[in-house]
């Protein structure tokens, strides 16, 4: 075991725009657990909502929480009974901890676990603490080796890529399909990469920010449309009741959903990935075109797949990583992440130990 007590800096959120740097002591990894030296942690939209608004929808920060559910680190110590991981190895951390015994886990629907402990989530009380800290102890089964080719920053993109692989899997075979992606933030951009990997023939992407659309192009979009500058930019796809086979709605903006419903073909599929509160929907078009509109959240087996695709750069995630700040500049990093004109994936970096 590792012996000396380590001290860890943690970024802890106490409420809206109240993120504090604190120091805590680090325990030893227990049986089946691994001690990781955190290397990189990405700021997700939900982290940003916790910071900017104190939560989103019904999910509120009700007690101090360490945010962060997208991280990669290096194995520093193994608890009893852990094998298959090497000291110093770079791993991506799967933040999802389903119970394995509830009715949905038993049905294989672990995403819908009744007792889900998703790291860095304020959904449950007590909140499940997250990964924005120097040292991290997690069960070994949550650690996925990321190889020696890629950076920790790339490995930390496994979580959002897993979200996108899961969303794309909802659409079935995309080979030769015409795809629309609305919203080109980190998730939209990674959906583009996942859809391209799944064989989509054409991938049109809409957003209001040119920087975001540039990243979508780098990730494999065949055409990008700035619907802020060009509000009728999708009109040509509305002919004959719509042209797209599949839409991935990643913006959670009502106009984008309306545009998607107008441009998707009869019996087409809209996969809703973006999240917001209540919006209004043109039910007449949904019914008249016999559309399918389904939600997609999180992932399960796709996490391992995401790490594998990143680790050999089959999917190169580097274009989406826009900023990196040391953990002690976490407040600045969160402020930067809120600027959509410039930021895509903003990551926190931690002192290297090896
Ligand atoms: Zn369960």
Image (spheres, rainbow, N blue to C red):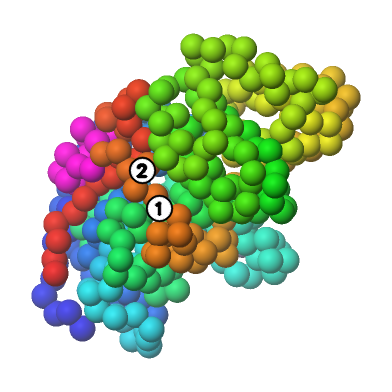
Characterize the local packing of mark 1: few (<14), some (14-19) or many (20 or more) Cα atoms within 10 angstroms: some
Whether tag 1 and tag 2 are in contact, CB under 8 A, the answer is: yes
Left or right: 308 as drawn, with respect to 273 = left
Q: State whether residue 84 is above or below residue 97.
A: below
Looking at the image, residue 25 sits to the left or right of residue 40; the answer is left
Per the image, the residue denoted by label 2 is 319
Q: Position of residue 273 (x, y in %)?
A: 59, 39
Q: Residue at x 45, y 43 (%)?
A: 219
* Residue 264 rendering spot, x and y as whole percentages: 74, 29
Q: Which residues are magenta?
A: 324-334
Front-most of residues 104 and 354: 354
Mostly what secondary structure, the magenta segment?
helix
Residue drawn at x 73%, y 66% as measured from the top left: 107
- Asked if residue 314 shows in the view, the reply is yes
Which label number is shown at residue 316? 1
Spatial CA distance of label 1 from label 2 is 8 Å
């Amino acid at each position: 075991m590792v012996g000396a007590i380590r001290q860890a800096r943690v970024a802890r959120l106490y409420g809206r725009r109240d993120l504090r740097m604190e120091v805590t002591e680090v325990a030893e990894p227990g049986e089946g657990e691994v001690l990781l030296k955190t290397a990189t942690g990405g700021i997700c939209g939900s982290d940003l909502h916790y910071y900017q608004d104190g939560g989103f929808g019904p999910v509120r920060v009700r007690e101090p929480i360490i945010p962060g559910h997208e991280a990669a680190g290096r194995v520093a110590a193994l608890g009893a009974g852990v094998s298959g991981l090497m000291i110093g190895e770079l791993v991506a951390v799967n933040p999802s901890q389903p119970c394995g015994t509830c009715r949905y886990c038993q049905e294989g629907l672990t995403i819908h676990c009744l007792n889900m402990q998703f790291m860095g989530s304020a959904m449950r009380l007590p909140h499940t603490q997250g990964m924005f800290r120097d040292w991290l102890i997690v069960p070994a089964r949550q650690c996925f080796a990321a190889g020696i080719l890629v950076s920790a920053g790339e490995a930390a993109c496994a979580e959002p890529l897993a979200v996108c692989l899961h969303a794309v899997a909802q659409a079935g075979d995309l080979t030769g399909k015409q795809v629309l992606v609305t919203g080109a933030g980190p998730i939209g951009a990674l959906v583009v990469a996942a859809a391209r990997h799944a064989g989509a023939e054409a991938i049109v992407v809409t957003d209001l920010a040119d920087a975001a659309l540039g990243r979508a192009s780098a990730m494999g979009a065949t055409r990008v449309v700035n619907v802020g500058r060009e509000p009728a930019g999708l009109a040509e796809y509305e002919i004959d009741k719509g042209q797209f086979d599949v839409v991935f709605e990643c913006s959670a903006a009502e106009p984008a959903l309306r545009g998607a419903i107008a441009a998707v073909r009869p019996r087409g599929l809209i996969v809703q990935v973006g999240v917001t509160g209540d919006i209004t929907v043109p039910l007449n078009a949904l019914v008249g075109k016999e559309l399918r509109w389904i939600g997609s959240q999180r992932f399960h087996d796709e996490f391992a797949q995401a790490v594998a695709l990143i680790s050999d750069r089959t999917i190169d995630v580097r274009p989406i990583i826009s900023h990196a700040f040391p953990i002690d500049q976490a407040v600045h990093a969160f402020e930067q992440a809120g600027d959509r004109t410039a930021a895509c994936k903003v990551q926190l970096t931690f002192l290297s130990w090896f």
